[in-house]
Image (cartoon, helix red, strand yellow):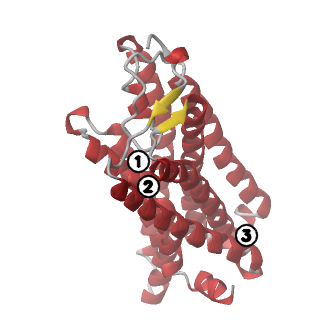
């Protein structure tokens, strides 16, 4: 094909050729998807129904669960449907929608994790001013800013990705429309635009990363000065689930988009994509509820 205008569909990665393995892939993804729906759905319902959880920390956690549900619903159902129907096709508009929603939801989630780090910083480092700084209006504005950041980043990335001419076929070597795989189909003269695409995303990623690191440096500085062991344990319990989620999200996402081409392989690309696009939405509810007594009590009550 000479350019992207002649492409009306893409072919996604097929997990297997045999019918038995296709059904196995469908079953595994279905189990993960149902676990994500159940876990995030329970958290959303518990926070919405229990007035004791109407605090900034749980308000942001509710938003995170909504974003998790959206992100896993963007990629996994289409892949399951393709395995069930023994096809690899996705329409051009469907692929563009996937790219937009992935950047929107994952960008919003990353921005929200930054806001949650700031919330933990205020709670631990400025506890007497917490109610004033983290008022209901401020929380809504910060959550809205996180969603808006994801939206505008998605708009920019999607417009740039699909304005690049595609000359290398229409086979995307991934189970969803992942931008690095789409860029492999581009013409050789699109290097500068690809570099601009990477730099635009890197600004958001590293900006949020620096904010998270600064927040946690100050948090741990204050926590280590707490005289009582019980106080330190409580502070760490507030921060460790968020830190675990941030670490999983950043490490897998950065490796997927910034790994050198020399170590790239179809199997490695597939594993990394599953780790950053499928696993976090399913395990985040577990991470946040394991050491959170208030949330566990609300879930039992629910």
Q: Which residue is mark 3?
A: 131
Q: Is residue 226 left or right of residue 103?
A: left
Above or below, 121 against 181 in this view is: below
Give the label on residue 132, or none: none
Check the image and name the residue furthest to the left: 262
Labelled pair 2, 1 in contact (Cβ < 8 Å): yes
At mark 3, the secondary structure is helix
Q: Where does the image place residue 276, in percent across and percent down from the top left?
A: 42, 53
Q: Which residue is mark 2?
A: 249
Check the image and name the residue furthest to the front: 19
Spatial distance from mark 3 to mark 1, Cα to Cα? 34 Å
Q: Is residue 195 left or right of residue 93?
A: left
Q: Where does the image place residue 237, in percent across and percent down from the top left?
A: 48, 78
The disc, 3 or 2, on the residue closer to the chain's N-terminal end is: 3
In front of the other: label 3 or label 1? Answer: 1
At mark 2, the secondary structure is helix
| 291 or 19, nearer to the observer | 19
| 254 or 176, nearer to the observer | 176
Residue 188 visible (yes or no): yes
Q: Quadrant of residue 188?
A: top left
Query: Mark 1: few, some, or many residues within 10 Å (few <14, many ≥20)?
Result: some
At mark 1, the secondary structure is helix
Residue at horizontal 76%, vertical 77%? 49
Rendered-image quadrant of the C terminus: bottom right
Q: Which residue is mark 1?
A: 253
Rendered-image quadrant of the N terminus: top left
């Amino acid at each position: 094909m000479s350019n992207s205008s002649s492409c009306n569909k893409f072919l996604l990665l097929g997990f297997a050729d045999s019918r038995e393995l296709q059904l196995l892939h469908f079953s595994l993804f279905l189990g993960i998807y149902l676990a994500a729906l159940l876990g995030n759905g329970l958290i959303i319902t518990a926070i919405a129904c229990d007035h004791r959880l109407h605090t900034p920390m749980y308000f942001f956690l509710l938003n995170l669960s909504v974003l998790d549900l959206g992100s896993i619903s963007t990629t996994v159902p289409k892949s399951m449907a393709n395995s069930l129907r023994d096809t690899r096709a996705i329409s051009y508009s469907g692929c563009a929608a996937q790219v937009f929603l992935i950047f929107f939801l994952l960008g919003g989630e990353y921005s929200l994790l930054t806001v949650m780090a700031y919330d933990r910083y205020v709670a631990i480092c400025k506890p007497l001013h917490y109610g004033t700084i983290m008022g209901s209006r401020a929380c809504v504005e910060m959550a809205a800013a996180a969603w808006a950041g994801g939206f505008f980043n998605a708009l920019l990335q999607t417009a740039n990705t699909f304005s690049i001419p595609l000359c290398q076929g229409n086979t995307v070597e991934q189970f969803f429309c992942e931008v690095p795989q789409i860029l492999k189909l581009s013409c050789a003269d699109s290097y500068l635009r690809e570099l601009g695409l990477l730099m635009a995303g890197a600004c958001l990623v590293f900006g949020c990363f620096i904010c998270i690191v600064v927040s946690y440096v100050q948090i741990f500085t204050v926590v280590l000065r707490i005289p009582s062991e019980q106080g330190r344990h409580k502070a760490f319990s507030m921060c460790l689930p968020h830190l675990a989620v941030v670490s999983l999200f950043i490490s897998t996402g950065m490796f997927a988009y910034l790994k050198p081409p020399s170590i790239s392989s179809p199997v490695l690309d597939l594993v990394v994509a599953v780790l950053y696009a499928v696993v976090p939405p399913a395990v985040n509810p577990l991470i946040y509820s394991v050491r959170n007594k208030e949330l566990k009590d609300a879930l039992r009550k629910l």
